[in-house]
Image: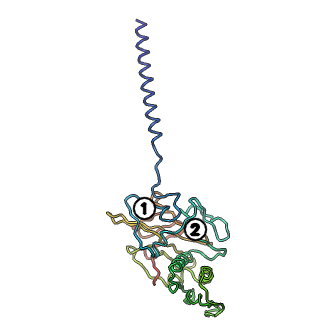
Amino acid sequence: MNHKRKKINLFALTIIIIITSIITLISSFTRCNQTEPQNTIINPEGKTLVSRFNPPAGFHRVESSENSFARYLQTLPLKKSGSKVRLYNGNLKANQAVHEAVVDISVGTKNLQQCADACMRLRAEYLFKAKQFNKIHFKLSNGFDARYEKWTQGYRIKIEGNKTNWIKRSEPSNTHADLMSYLEIVFSYAGTLSLSKELKKVKLNEMEPGDMFITGGSPGHAVMVVDMTIHPETKQKLFMLVQSYMPAQDIHILKNLNNNNLSPWYPLNFGLDLNTPEWNFSTNDLMRFGD
């Protein structure tokens, strides 16, 4: 009788061991084949805006024509994923929690290329690349229209008190270095207040890449829309923003701190206030360059 009981116990133990082994094997197999949840928006290997950031599931990137300002912005070069934002003097920006990527464009060595300046820089770089030199012009704080074409003819801007004039000082030239020296003067004597006065207001539902949210003042702030996506069924739109800030620093793509799963995209139906990491804008702050 005891012998029988031992056989039964041994059989039961064997069955338990087999079942436990099967469960362990299945569990192990499942773990090996499971992948961690992936962020389908961010591709760390991407070297440009469009290759680094995908539209969220169900959305499609808004198409742009080949030589448009929108296409230029969508293909901005980006520094290596994880790059930090640096100031004009090489130091790190104090707040490194606001950016999703850093645009690979120089900031210069002077404390000049701040918020509105970064928007003007991107606009000027596009027009220079497109050889639309006559469209490169910005108004200084005193209302003087600083036209790049005049600069290429060898004229320079002379400012004495409230008077601003063109003075012939060099031979005609039109290189990228000339553009940068011109922009240095513009950055020195223009800002959010002067820029906001020469832009035209845009309705929120008419937003396009290249538009800006801008609050003119001292201080004021400006950020630029660089990309957009749309959901073909719901027609919901999302947009992406870049900024520089004070002191002058690398242009960087802003995080959406209100929705980490959507970042760096922002919903167009954001309500009365657009909350960006370092400034809040209203729906009335959306503006656009004229021709």
- Amino acid type for the residue under numbered disc 1: Pro
Q: Are marks 2 and 1 in contact (CB under 8 Å)?
A: no
Quarter of the view holding residue 89: bottom right
**Residue 55: numbered disc:** 1
Characterize the local packing of mark 2: few (<14), some (14-19) or many (20 or more) Cα atoms within 10 angstroms.
Answer: some
| Image location of residue 18, percent across then percent down | 43, 24
Quarter of the view holding residue 246: bottom right
Up the image or down, 29 lies above or below 280; here it is above
Up the image or down, 167 lies above or below 53; here it is below
- Amino acid type for the residue under numbered disc 2: Asp
Alpha-carbon distance for marks 2 and 1?
A: 21 Å
Up the image or down, 46 lies above or below 133; here it is above
Q: 68 or 100: which is nearer to us? A: 68
Quadrant into which the N terminus falls:
top left
Residue 71 visible in image = yes
| Image location of residue 266, percent across then percent down | 44, 65
| Image location of residue 204, percent across then percent down | 40, 74
**Residue 104: numbered disc:** 2
> How has the structure been colored for display?
rainbow
Left or right: 200, with 133 as reference point: left
Q: 38 or 163: which is nearer to us? A: 38
Left or right: 69, with 148 as reference point: left
Up the image or down, 26 lies above or below 228; here it is above
